[in-house]
Image: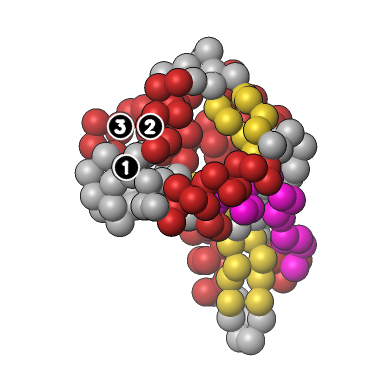
Amino acid sequence: MILRPKTFIGPERLGVFEILFDWIREGRRIPILGDGSNRYQLLAVEDLVEATVAAASAPVAGETFNVGATEFGTVRSDLEGLIAHAGSASRLRPVPARPAELALRALELARLSPLAEWHYRTAHRDSYVEPAKAQQILGFAPRLSNEEALCKTYDWYLANRGRVGSAGVTHRVPWDQRALGLLKRLS
């Protein structure tokens, strides 16, 4: 049996979202690639755990299941919901996708950005799966929407940010924003 989760976030699992949360906490402008009208499905880590338990206890050898939030809006609407939840002065700032991709690629190659090609090449494109098979066969339905998972994870980040920056807490290595730190200071 294979479980194919979308990007999952939650306590102890921030990844690149640590940078986003840091900027929102500080009220910075948040650059988004493109206009934010794309749909990008996430999955709360607690929903991933439930899906894993459901799959482990079902007779589904050889099956593949996509799992992701069943409720998700556009990148713009999900991030605006998070910013409102945070009570932040942050605002989304659309950036033309192609020039941003080229700049981020150059920064990545120069080892001046923590973002990998996968981050910036997928951020402005639709990215979602159909989880109906997991719901029908496993009886699994995610409880949290994208926005709820983002808000809950942001709250965890705030409560734990004093220890988040150390290696191994939410990622294998701490996030060094490098060139993004300059952009952050200018935002």
**Model colouring:** secondary structure
Nearer-N-terminus badge (3/2): 3
Classify mark 2: helix, strand or loop.
Answer: helix
Classify mark 3: helix, strand or loop.
Answer: helix
| Magenta span main SS | loop
Label 1 vs label 3, nearer the camera? 1
Question: Residue 96 got which mark?
Answer: none
Q: Disc 2 and disc 1: Cα gap in Å? A: 8 Å
Instruction: Say how many tags the image has.
Output: 3
Horizontal side of 165 relative to 85 (left or right) equals left
Amino acid on which the number 2 mark rests in the picture: Gly
Inspect this view and state whether residue 167 appears.
yes
Residue 16 image offset from top left, x and y in percent: 45, 45
- What residue is rendered at 54% in x and 36% in y? 150
Q: Residues within 10 Å of mark 3 (few under 14, many from 20)?
A: some
Q: Provide the residue designation for mark 1.
A: 176
Q: Disc 1 and disc 3: Cα gap in Å? A: 15 Å
Inspect this view and state whether residue 72 appears.
no
- What residue is rendered at 42% in x and 36% in y? 180
Horizontal side of 186 relative to 83 (left or right) equals left
Amino acid on which the number 1 mark rests in the picture: Asp
State yes or no: residue 33 in magenta.
no
Q: Provide the residue designation for mark 2.
A: 181
Nearer-N-terminus badge (1/3): 3
State yes or no: residue 125 in magenta.
yes
Magenta residues span: 119-133
Q: Provide the residue designation for mark 3.
A: 161
Residue closer to the observer: 85 or 21:
21
Q: Residues within 10 Å of mark 2 (few under 14, many from 20)?
A: some
Amino acid on which the number 3 mark rests in the picture: Arg
